[in-house]
Image: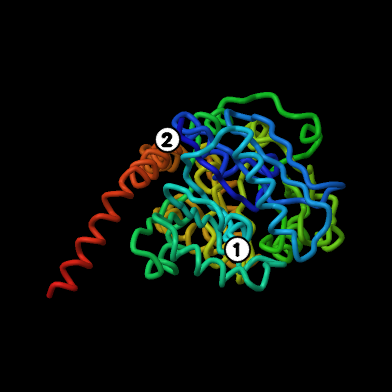
Amino acid sequence: MKYLLCFSHLSWNFVYQRPQHLLTRFSKFYQVFYFEEPKIGDSDRYLVNIQDGVSIVELFVSGHDDTTNERIQDLINQVLKEYDIENYINWYYTPMALQFTDHLNPEKIIYDSMDELSAFRFAPPHLLELEDRLFKIADVVFTGGNSLYEAKKNRHHNIHAMPSSIDKAHFGKARKIQHEPEDQMQIGFPRLGFFGVVDERFDIELLREVSAQRPDWQFVIIGPVVKINPDDLPQAHNIHYLGPKTYTELPQYIAQWDIALILFALNESTEFISPTKTPEYLAAGKPVISTPIKDVVQPYGNAGLVQIVDDADSFISAATKILDDTEKEHWLSMVDHFLENDSWDHTFNRMNALINNVKKVQAQIINTQKHINHV
């Protein structure tokens, strides 16, 4: 049995995104253990439950002190002992996990750098130092987008851009769904919607300004509010915060939207993001308006698939044009052609091949070094 131990900063049930898409596929080839970020509990203990073929490990520690990381190590050792885990790969979503996994002896180390975590609000001050260590010991590194790859490509010998992909069949359902959920049913039209995490990346002021200038447009916001005060969000009769929804429910909501939105402000935390929602919106057949996020501008904006805006006036102009356009067949044909070879299965196959090829890469490096020394 082959094992894959993933150490993440995200709870498995927070938002269904890149880790879930990838690791459920890896679970067909490995027994996957997904270690969530340790939480404060009444005692040092762990819980394991299986979801989507992945063993989710919750770690609890009774407070923080100088022994915390050692106690987390002990919990991880207990999991390995209970499940008789000997040969395994370590997969990291956060460098912070190095603090309590340095004692492990994995066959390979994978770093899937899905975001620039150091730019996020409340990022630990020593995260960058730990990431430097992770780059030194990782066998292969993946990045969640092309701009993040450009920023980090010189830090590792075996690094690859792996932009987040789509489950076309899942979001494609939105093109045919007729019924809609009760909490959206009473909202008028036209509807402009956003789904995702509402945090420091969300462009609060753009939403505030556009919703005020176009009170006849309805704005539907779906997702959890984290790291920001909900009271800071704009409140108006035409803004509807529907809260978090499951991944399964999303096509039911987006099906009845007129326009889908990527409402991200331009700041440190969004400089290198590659929003998964971009291809998901398109697969649902919805016109998309986005702020000028690098990984949306290229390739989606430059291909004419997404309208890029940088202020309220350009937003309103783009939305008006979309709402007035009754002929979307050519655009939809372009979308389908663009997304034709894009899938999480394809991304998984590329990543799995690179992981399986690690030993060959290591041998090439050793041979190159020998040649340099000989010369």
Task: Tell me, for residue 290, which label it has, or none.
Answer: none
Return the x and y of residue 137 as percentages of the image width and height: 44, 61
Q: Name the spot of residue 370 as percent of width and height, x first.
A: 19, 66
In the rendered view, does 265 fall on the left or right side of 185?
left
Amino acid type, residue under disc 1 in the picture: Leu
Dot 1 lies on which element?
helix
The residue under the point 53% across, 64% down is 292
Q: How many discs appear?
A: 2
Q: Is residue 269 above or below residue 102?
A: below
- The residue labelled by disc 1 is 117
Q: Tell me which amino acid carries mark 2.
A: Asp
Where on the picture, by quarter, is residue 331?
top left
User: From this viewpoint, is residue 47 visible?
Assistant: yes
- Residue on which the image places disc 2: 345
207 left or right of 272?
A: right
| Left-right relation of 282 to 365 | right
User: In the structure shown, which secondary structural element does the residue marked by tag 2 occupy?
Assistant: helix
Q: Of the residues tagged 2 and 1, which is closer to the observer?
A: 1
| Residue 17 place in picture, x, y as percent | 59, 43
In the image, residue 337 above or below residue 293: above
Residue 194 visible, this angle: no
Residue 208, compared with residue 356, is above or below; it is below
Sequence-wise, which precedes: disc 2 or disc 1? 1
Within 10 Å of disc 1 (Cα), the crowding (few <14, some 14-19, many 20+) is many
For residue 60, above or below residue 206 = above
The front one of 174 and 347 is: 347
